[in-house]
Image (cartoon, rainbow, N blue to C red):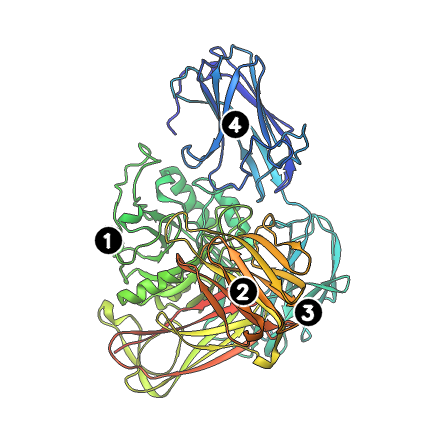
Amino acid sequence: MPYSHYLPEHMGSIAMTPKGPFVAGSHQELTLVYTAGTFGIDDTGMLKISWRTTSDMAKPQFDKPSAPNYTTVEASNGAVLEVRYDRTNIRPWQNTITIRVGRGYLREGDTLTIRLGDRRQGSPGYRLQTNVEARVQWRSSVDAFATYEFCELDHPEFDLVAGKGETWKAIVPSLVVAGEPFRLALVAEDMWGNPSGDIETTLTLEPSRPLRGLSESVAIKKGGAPRVIDNIVAESEGDIEIRVLADGKEVARANPMRVVKDKPALRRYWADLHGQSGETIGMGSAEDYFRYARDAAFVDMVGHQGNDFQITDAFWKELNRLTAEFDKPGKFVCLPGYEWSGNTGMGGDRNIFYRKEGRPIRRSSHILVEGQTSTDAIYTADKLFDWLKDEDCRVIAHVGGRYADLHYAHDGRVERTVEVHSSWGTFEWLLHDAFEKGYRVGVVCHSDDHKGRPGATRPGASTFGAIGGLSCYFMSELTRGALFEALRRRHHYGTTCPRIFLDLKAAFEKPVTGFSEDPKLGAAKEFSVTEAMMGDIIRPGSTPMKLNAEVIGTAPVDRIDVLHGTRVVQTARPFTANDLGKRVRVLWQGAEYRGRGRETIWQGKLAVAGNRIARFAPVNFLNPERRVQETTPGSVLTWNSVTTGNLAGIDLWLDQANAGSISIETNVVSGSVDLGSLTDSTVAFDGGGLGRRLSVYRLPEADWTRHATIEHAVTFPGGADLPVYVRVTQADGNQAWSSPIYLIA
């Protein structure tokens, strides 16, 4: 970073009290005291206090003494100070409080006292970062000579630990063989989603069928979570659910698990292949990142994708060492790689994964590693693909701060996949971009975690609008080679994080032509098939395809949509019009546009007239600081919510099913709905932007089935490719997308 190195020992020092540790997301009063050095600070000189770009530490405010995050700065000599907060510092330390000595100056020994969360006038304190992290830093620097040349000072540090465990997760494999042992992982989380050992309880475990090796209850002592129960065995085939209860109340339900009689050709493994640590723009160390994925999120596979222009040669070497160390075939897969982070106009972000360590990194630029590497940069995505064509690698198109522009560049030899969901939001439009260009790609969802929590990242209090995704890969074994084969064949699906069980199969009345490889890429082996799975490429001729999709959700299934390319052609809902009544859902979704600043803040008000709200429940409100408020009991709700392509909403349980009306006002779109005319259809209001809309429809009053199926018949019309895929939406707002089956001429 471009700091001055002139006599740092004479520039002063800074210290923090108290020193912590603190509970993540808690409100505290923190005092930072800067003591001026030999030169003091001259008139108009400055002190900066910075913290990480991706941290959701609260924005300090300087005007409301009784409100949260009130911050004051005082000079011991009475100098007049100008204080502001902005995000204009150098990555990855953009969050910055700048203190300018506007009138006066500081001599050696004079102090500046910064109170974050100053409680002297009633403020509850300053809300700290919501994710756990060791050694959170305040980066401090001083411009003692009023020259805009800043010299780094000490960096006060503190630890953030998890709060009390409030919720539970239960994780099992999605597919097991009868008679083979598996494990159940029980994870307690605090209000911000951090794994917590601060809980003591006895859990009752209720499987839907007897399981050998699973006790009826398990005692959890403080410090005893996550808890792993190994060597559980299902004796016979079938679907199993495991309910977890505390004091007779269900606190978790394990993800769906299917038990099969015989060893399948392809098993199901869950992965989060996309995230980064504090060595680049994230938090925590890369070693802790891999350990979290394995021991706290309990995913089967993980990758690390640091922004290339922040990866030094030393870190690239260390990253390769770590992936080799953590990769254990058959137990845990860990991939080396990086994120090629070219500017949007140069092609945008791509995730690059190598099968083996020791391969080179070719950066999009050297902007933050100048002078630390001799490797030539590759500025554009088309030239990147040209360089990668002979590498043993896989590439995934990604949407982050920059989005992958498939119109600019794509190479199906290495780029077989697009990421349609991450903590940045939902981007089904990227898949549709691929269809528009005739590309044959599969679908994944990963987290793009920046918080040291791959496989289980949460948005916290940041403007990130979504929980990070997960992908299920169909693989012959748990190895890098099998993962590369799954990516090559597009045999995978993605979710917004829950381990939804999704199966997509196609049958043909007579043999049709399948391909071992995309025939657009050159010679491809052809063979006769009567069945296909997601990701397959089929030349059906005039033979109809009968598609069968099966879903076992982690919550009741709202709908299954079948899409032909970008068009929904069939929808199945596992309930009938007779099941609908007094429960009404108000749903909003979409984003501002494709690039940075895509988040849409929904400031809303809902009023019921001629009826009464008996109770309500938020849907996909992921930030505990953003709540639905009942401003007028029984009739008026207000909220502040964020979407970045994903879904959020409110469910209403009304006193009467058909009486009265609902009026909705938001900063994006408004509308009203007559409840008497709201039957089993959806009333939608267009909000512009990128897929933004407000919808109102009915749902069954009580929770319904988590199991749903759909059948769909299609005859290929010839001509352009026909990609056929399914999109699943659950009642809790979570979604899943299959990779398409491609019907080709």
- Residue 171 visible? The answer is no
Q: Quadrant of the N terminus?
A: top left
Name the image quarter holding the C terminus: bottom left
The reply to whether the C-beta atoms of the residues labelled 3 and 1 are less than 8 Å apart is no
Q: Position of residue 511 (x, y in %)?
A: 33, 87
Q: Earlier in the sequence, mark 3 or mark 1?
A: 1
Q: Image point 37% across, 38% down: which residue? A: 312
Q: Quadrant of residue 219?
A: bottom right
What residue does disc 1 label? Answer: 382
| In the depicted structure, whether residue 721 falls above or below residue 106 | below
Q: Nearer the viewer, residue 308 or 117?
A: 117
Q: Residue at x 35, y 44 (%)?
A: 308
Residue 679 shown left or right of residue 202 in the figure: left
Q: Name which of mark 2 and mark 4 comes first in the sequence.
A: 4
According to the image, label 2 marks what residue? 499
Q: Is residue 407 visible?
A: yes
| Residue density around tag 1, few if under 14, some if 14–19, many if 20 or more, within 10 Å | some
The disc at residue 655 is 3
Question: What residue is shown at x 41% (from left), y 45% (from top)?
Answer: 306
Q: Residue at x 69, y 75 (%)?
A: 210
Q: Which residue bears the numbered disc 4?
A: 155
| Mark 3 and mark 1: Cα distance apart in space | 60 Å
Q: Gap between marks 3 and 2, in whole Å?
A: 35 Å
